[in-house]
Image (cartoon, rainbow, N blue to C red):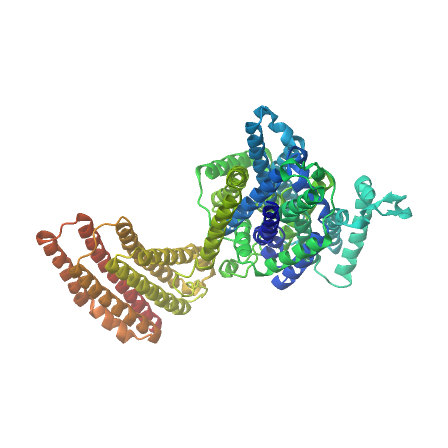
């Protein structure tokens, strides 16, 4: 029987590695986004600084491991055989939950996940113990460290409100005084900002770093014979003033002598600091439980007692974490940081929500987001009425952004926000985490950094009237995911610990196998999520300022659209002929992607028109009409693809052989014409364009024949209304596809003649 516990400890060690990987993938957003979003320094430099921060933070995190042992439950109330099951359930749940959110690309809290999995497993195990004894269910409070658990939970929830509010206030005043021309301010202003920012970040690094080292208890005469830890906690004002004066001087010299950009220095230092905080604060979330399990096993093995009789009160004492485990964990985290593709997906969510530019919004507005935006507008209008028009105008002037050129809307490498906002994100998050650390609260770094970023975005007017409902909906979705994390973590860990208790080793093996299948499936889904998509570049945004340039860019886009439509129609015909749902599903994915690409071009019309030369206004009409026709093509194809998918998915009647033959013939005609059109546009031949237009009646006649043939089949032999309706829809929409394609060719031909003349 003892061997089962050795196996469980080994399994927990393996799960710890998996948890480190999925945890870093989720939490990289916390310390990378400000630097990545501002494009202040190169991505390689960002990653090097973050890696150094993670490595240092991992070495300094020993003290926080107590949370996993005694922060949520009272270990003395459980025996070894019970505690090892609790730890196993916690790790199984945690890795599954974090991988799920990573796959969705949603940032969640590893702290909340570990706290509520520990709480859920402990509560359910306590219920099992009580139900088997003569106790009352009210005795659950004896098993749970209610005071500490409540403190942690309320601290985490409070951090959401505080981070949003403080982030918004600091950003608003910073922008009010520094404006978007902050780099042109007087040298002493930049040095003052640098002094405040760098002193806050370095104090934060000291608070997070020094407490995890053996130097924390050293005494020095220079600080009155006090311990370093006590000095930092009791002499906050003195340390802050000295720290500020030092960094103000360094900032001034860096700007004056070295001509350095102080904002880049702040962003680099802040990235290192937050990475250190992440590893120092959140490493417990990944390896705290396995280490506690290993130390529990050691204590039990040394006691010689029966597992079901050995009380785990030993976990209440402070036990140092072996440095080698911290070093190995830090190494895994650094490697994951460089290799994880899911981390980039999670990062994109926050960057999109805080982007200063006009982007394709990921989230759809809901009733709550609309209500919040409406209330905010009413309050804002009321506030403006209280102030004089002169004051309101002066404030608006300070928030006018003249740095973001309209052409940046087409630039994928344009920063999501400027260096001032990136600096504020890092400074405010650092200060808030430092304060929480001083009160020994293992707060959620994800909640703090995310909500600070949202607060600064709000104050910086990144959420404009055209984007506010989408951005607010996105924030609500993320926050809703956080609550879902807590509830799911509690319930799933509770259910798993119950199943393990009842089923023993067999239950553990089955659950582990199921979780591995789910994680493997998520990995393959993430890896192959674009595998079924057509291997073509996205449509290029129009950047030309003349009709000739727009015509050339249109040629590229028309060729791509025609080619993609041809491939989608091929999947459609194949799927219907074989009654194959997977082929139609691929067509469905690809038409959705094409529609989204065309929508992005249409959303760019404002900036396109703004950038046009005054003498090339005729290009505007061509641009608008060509995109409208492309959109019509996509809409027609999307209609028949979705109808066909629904038909096959509902397992309605298969197409008859005669219908399949007619459909293939129609497809060949369509395919041939599309390919001819693509070659025509490549060769820029007006003669060939005219030739294609002259074939209109011939092709339309063939399509009409197919419609008449289906009418005869319906009168004489067809028995399926669903089959008939779908087939007529396909033929009629194919005619519209062909007509719209000819309209594009005609429009292109007319404008080519105008340009040449």
Quadrant where the C terminus sits is: bottom left
Of residues 695 and 275, which is closer to you in this image?
275
Res. 69 visible in picture: yes
Q: Residue 117 in the image: state x and y as whole percent.
A: 57, 40
Res. 390 visible in picture: no
What residue is at 41 percent from the left and 63 percent from the top?
A: 539
Quadrant where the N terminus sits is: top right
Q: How many marks?
A: 0
Hey, which quadrant is residue 638 in on the image? bottom left
Which residue occupies the extreme left position in the image?
716
Of residues 703 and 222, which is closer to you in this image?
222
Please tell me whether residue 391 is drawn above or below residue 579 in the rendered image: above
Left or right of 2 in this view: 713: left
Left or right of 611 in this view: 404: right
Which residue occupies the extreme right position in the image?
221
Of residues 578 and 563, which is closer to you in this image?
578
Hey, which quadrant is residue 403 in on the image? bottom right
Hey, which quadrant is residue 160 in on the image? top right
Of residues 36 and 398, which is closer to you in this image?
36
What residue is at 63 percent from the left and 50 percent from the top?
A: 421
Q: Residue 216 in the image: state x and y as whole percent.
A: 80, 47
What residue is at 13 percent from the left and 61 percent from the top?
A: 705
Q: Residue 90 in the image: state x and y as whole percent.
A: 57, 43
Q: Residue 447 in the image: state x and y as whole percent.
A: 60, 43
Left or right of 353 in this view: 281: right
């Amino acid at each position: 029987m003892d061997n089962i516990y050795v196996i469980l400890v080994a399994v927990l060690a393996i799960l710890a590695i998996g948890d480190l990987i999925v945890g870093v993938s989720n939490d990289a957003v916390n310390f990378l986004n400000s630097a990545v979003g501002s494009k202040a320094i190169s991505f390689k430099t960002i990653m090097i600084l973050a890696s150094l921060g993670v490595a240092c933070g991992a070495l300094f995190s020993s003290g926080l491991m107590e949370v996993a042992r005694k922060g949520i439950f009272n270990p003395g109330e459980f025996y070894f055989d019970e505690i090892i099951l609790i730890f196993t359930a916690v790790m199984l749940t945690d890795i599954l939950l974090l991988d799920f959110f990573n796959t969705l690309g949603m940032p969640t809290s590893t702290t909340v996940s570990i706290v509520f999995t520990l709480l859920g497993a402990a509560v359910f195990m306590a219920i099992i113990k009580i139900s088997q004894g003569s106790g009352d269910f009210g005795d659950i409070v004896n098993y749970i460290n209610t005071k500490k658990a409540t403190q942690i939970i309320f601290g985490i929830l409070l951090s959401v409100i505080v981070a949003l509010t403080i982030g918004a206030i600091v950003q608003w005043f910073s922008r009010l005084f520094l404006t978007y021309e902050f780099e042109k301010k007087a040298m002493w202003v930049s040095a003052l900002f640098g002094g405040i920012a760098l002193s806050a970040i370095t104090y934060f690094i000291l608070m997070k770093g020094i407490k995890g080292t053996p130097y924390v208890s050293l005494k020095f005469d220079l600080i009155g014979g006090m311990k370093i830890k006590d000095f930092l906690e009791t002499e906050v004002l003195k340390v802050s003033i000295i720290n500020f004066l030092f960094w103000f001087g360094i900032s001034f010299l860096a700007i004056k002598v070295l001509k350095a950009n102080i904002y880049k220095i702040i962003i680099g230092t802040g990235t290192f600091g937050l990475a250190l905080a992440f590893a120092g604060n959140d490493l417990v979330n990944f390896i705290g439980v396995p280490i506690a399990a290993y130390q529990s096993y050691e204590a039990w093995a040394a006691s010689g007692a029966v597992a079901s009789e050995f009380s785990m009160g030993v976990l209440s004492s402070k036990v140092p974490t072996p440095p080698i485990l911290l070093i190995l964990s830090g190494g895994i985290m650094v490697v994951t940081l460089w290799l994880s593709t899911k981390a980039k997906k999670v990062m994109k969510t926050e960057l999109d929500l805080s982007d200063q530019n006009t982007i394709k919004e990921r989230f759809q507005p809901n009733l709550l987001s609309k209500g919040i935006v409406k209330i905010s507008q009413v309050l804002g209008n009321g506030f403006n009425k209280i102030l004089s028009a002169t004051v309101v105008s002066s404030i608006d002037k300070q928030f006018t952004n003249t740095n973001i050129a309209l052409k940046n809307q087409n630039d994928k490498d344009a920063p999501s926000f400027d260096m001032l906002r990136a600096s504020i994100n890092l400074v405010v998050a650092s200060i808030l985490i430092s304060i929480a650390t001083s009160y020994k609260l293992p707060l959620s770094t994800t909640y703090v950094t995310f909500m600070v970023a949202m607060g600064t975005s709000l104050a910086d007017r990144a959420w404009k009237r055209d984007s506010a409902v989408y951005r607010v909906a996105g924030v609500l979705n993320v926050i809703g995911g956080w609550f879902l994390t807590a509830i799911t973590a509690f319930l799933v860990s509770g259910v798993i610990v119950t199943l393990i208790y009842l089923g023993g080793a067999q239950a553990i093996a089955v659950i582990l196998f199921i979780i591995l299948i789910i994680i493997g499936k998520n990995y393959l889904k993430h890896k192959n999520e674009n595998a079924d998509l057509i291997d073509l570049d996205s449509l290029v945004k129009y950047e030309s300022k003349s009709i000739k340039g727009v015509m050339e860019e249109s040629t590229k886009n028309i060729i791509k659209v025609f080619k993609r439509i041809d491939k989608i129609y091929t999947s459609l015909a194949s799927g219907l002929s074989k009654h194959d749902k997977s082929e139609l599903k691929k067509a469905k994915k690809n038409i959705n992607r094409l529609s989204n690409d065309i929508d992005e071009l249409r959303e760019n019309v404002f900036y396109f028109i703004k950038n046009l030369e005054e003498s090339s206004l005729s290009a505007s009409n061509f641009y608008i009409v060509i995109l409208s026709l492309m959109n019509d093509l996509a809409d027609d194809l999307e209609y028949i693809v979705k109808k066909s998918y629904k038909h096959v998915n509902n397992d309605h009647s298969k197409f008859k052989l005669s219908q399949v033959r007619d459909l293939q013939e129609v497809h060949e005609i369509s395919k041939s014409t599309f390919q001819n059109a693509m070659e025509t546009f490549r060769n820029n031949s007006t003669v060939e364009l005219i030739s294609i237009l002259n074939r209109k009646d011939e092709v339309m006649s063939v399509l009409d024949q197919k419609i008449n043939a289906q009418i005869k089949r319906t009168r004489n032999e067809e028995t399926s209304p669903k089959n008939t309706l779908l087939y007529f829809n396909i033929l009629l929409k194919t005619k519209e596809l062909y007509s719209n394609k000819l309209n594009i060719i005609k429009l292109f031909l007319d404008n080519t003649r105008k340009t040449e003349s």
